[in-house]
Amino acid sequence: MRMPEPERREQGEQIIPLINIVFLLLIFFMLAGTLSAPDPFDIDPPEARQGLSADEPQEGLLSISAAGGLAFEGDAIAMEVLADTVRTRLREDEMLRLTLKADAGVRATFLLDVMDALRNAGADSVLLLTSPES
Amino acid sequence: MRIETGQRRRRQLIGLTPLIDVVFILLIFFMLASSFSNWQSISLGVPGEGRAPAADSETLVVRVLADGSLEVDGDRIDSDALVSRFRVLFAEDPQRTVVVRPDDGVTLQRIVTVVEHLNEAGGNRITLSREAR
C-alpha cells in the first residue's frame, strides 16, 4: 500500500511545472501578438527601410491583393461600389483615417483607380502599410 | 485519515486535467490567431481632380517608367541623383508637393521605394497621380 502513494505525488509534481510553462507561453502570446481579422486573401506588403511604425487598424482598412481583389474592413467588395461604401463609412465617422494594405505586386494603374475611387469618396490622404526590409 | 488524504489528492488531480486542457486550447488559439507582423506606414496624398499638378509650377513631378527608371523634368536619373537633387529643393521649401507618376506596369514595391527616397530627401507631401494624357 505504501508504494503507489509516492508515484501519485510524482505525477502531480510533474504536471505543475508544465502548467507554469504553458501559462507563460499563453500570457506571452496574449500580450505580444495582436489579434486581427484575417484578410480574405494573401497579402505580401511592400518593403520599406523607414516609415512610422503603425498598428494594423481594424477600421478603415482597405486590402488590395495582387490579383486585383479588394476588401474593405474585411469584406470583399467590388470596385464599382467602393466609393459609395467608403463615402458612407466616412460620413459615419469623420475622424476615420483610411489605411491601404496592398500587395507589393499591385499594378500602379490599379492602385490609381482605387485612389480615384477614394478621392470620389471624399478622402484626401491615406496611410500605406509597409513592412520593414528583411 | 486515509480517506481524507485520498480524497484531497483525487480532487487535485481531477481539477488539474481540465484546467490544462482549457489552457492548452487557449494557447493554441492565441498562437494561431495572433499576428506578429511589424507594420510601418507611409502617408500618401490622394490627388484631387481640381488641383491638377501640371498647372502648379511649385509642384515637382517624378515619373516612374515601366522599366523602373526615374524621370524628372525629362532627365533620366538614378535614385541617388534623385535624393541629392530633391534634398536641395526641399531644403529651400520642405512643404513642396511632389507628384509621383507611375507608368503602366510599375509595381507598388517600386513606387514605395521611390516614395521612400523622397522621404529620405526631406519631402513629406507626396501624392500619386495618373500619367497626364
Image (cartoon, grey):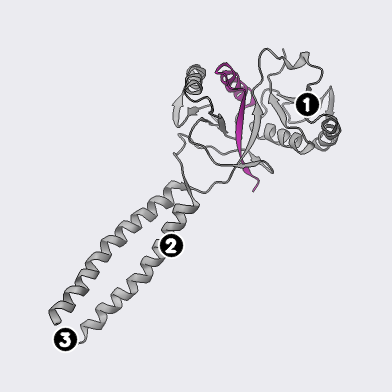
Residue at the spot 25% in from the left edge and 78% down from the top edge: A8
Do the residues at discs 3 and 2 belong to one chain?
yes
Q: Residues within 10 Å of mark 1 (few under 14, many from 20)?
A: some
Q: Position of residue A44 (x, y in %)?
A: 56, 39
Question: Quadrant location of residue B61?
Answer: top right
Which corner quadrant holds the N terminus of chain A? bottom left
Q: Is residue B33 visible?
A: yes
Q: Are the residues under badges 3 and 1 in a single subunit?
A: no
* Residue B96 - label: 1
Per the rendered image, the range of residues in magenta is A107-134
Residue on which disc 3 sits: A1
Q: Is residue A112 magenta?
A: yes
Number of numbered discs present? 3
Residue B63 visible? The answer is no
Q: Quadrant of residue B125?
A: top right
In 3D space, how far apart are the residues under numbered discs 3 and 1 (Cα atoms)? Answer: 88 Å
Q: Separation of disc 2 and disc 1 at Cα? A: 51 Å
Which circle's residue, 3 or 2, is located before the other in the chain? 3
Q: For residue A24, which numbered disc appears in the image? A: 2
Residue A105 sits in quarter: top right
- Answer left or right for B73 relative to B53: right
Give the camera-side residue of A108 and A51: A51
Amino acid type, mark 1: Arg
Circle 1 marks a residue in which chain? B
Look at label 3 and name its amino acid. Met
The span from disc 3 to disc 2 (Cα, nearest Å) is 37 Å
Q: Position of residue B50 (x, y in %)?
A: 68, 12
Q: Amino acid at mark 2?
A: Leu
Is disc 2 in contact with disc 1, using a CB cutoff of under 8 Å?
A: no
